[in-house]
Amino acid sequence: LVQELEPVNYGRAVAKRIELRLLAGDRRGAVAAGIDGLRRLGMALPDGEQPTAALELASIDLEEVRGLGTRRRIRDGGVKAILEVISALLAVTSMVDAALHGYLVREHLRLLLAHGRHVTAPLAAVQAAMMLAAAPGGRSRAEALAEVARALAAKEGPNCPRHRVEPGYWFIATWTRPFAEALTPLREAVTWAIEAGDLDSASNATLMQVSLVFAAGLHLRSLERSSNVAAHRMQQWQAGEQEIMARVFERFAGLLLAGDPEAVEARLEDPFDLAAL
């Protein structure tokens, strides 16, 4: 197939295959499809762990990343194809192979800085910020890079995967900003994800929103209602894991509203008792 299609079209075909594997619940199959596609496009991939990825990201010049918004757009079809596949893979690699995820995050940003502007630049920046956030002493730099990612997304327009940028941004921003501030942007991210046909991202953003309703201290009725709506949506989207989590929040809110301390205590002992949901 790679010999029959132009590189850009091949990259899109591989990205679509990854998306279809994710819709089928086959995360490992999605990663395998992406790795095969990247190799066919000529990208070298590591055989083992890449422990230096976060350290290398920590040394990146934030102003150089910010400058991607004013650089000339990438024209090399091969590079654009690789970026397309990496962008699709990053939706799943963190859950399957942390070492591969770190390598791809680093390479995504490195390719952009080497070649120029692309619609996936905001995603690359926010993914790098989330990696930095997990590194010792990386919090302040992660916050700054997340702000850069959001600024880049604002410049890119509708083709940018902003529905994947906003949740990452708010994951970091809520360290220093009120949880409630994230609720409206996350609702918008869910809408954008649905419009893009990305139900996996829609499910993740929806669940994040429910958890922040709880963390923000909104009324328990709001938590019960929002988690119920979320669970029904995820059932329609066949997002089994996220649906279970939403049901846990719904059940917990219901028990608190009922004022039964013994039932609440029992639930806290085993919050994932599916039979009780």
Image (tube, grey):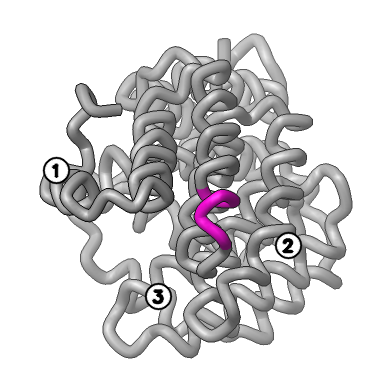
Residue 170: % across, % down: 58, 66
Residue 243: % across, % down: 42, 29
Kind of residue sitting beneath label 3: Ala
Magenta-colored span: 219-223
The residue that disc 3 covers is 133
Looking at the picture, tell me which residue is in the foreground, 189 or 142: 189
The residue that disc 1 covers is 270
Residue 269: % across, % down: 11, 49
Comparing labels 3 and 1, the label whose residue is closer to the camera? 1
* Label disc, if present, on residue 116 of the rendered structure: 2
Looking at the picture, tell me which residue is in the foreground, 271 or 261: 261
Horizontal side of 270 relative to 230 (left or right) equals left
Separation of residues labelled 1 and 2 (CA atoms): 50 Å
Secondary element at tag 2: loop
Name the residue at 51% across, 40% down.
Answer: 227
Kind of residue sitting beneath label 1: Asp
Q: Quadrant of the N terminus?
A: top right
Comparing labels 1 and 2, the label whose residue is closer to the camera? 1
Kind of residue sitting beneath label 2: Gly
Secondary element at tag 1: loop
Residue 69 can be seen, yes or no: yes
**Farthest front residue in view:** 259
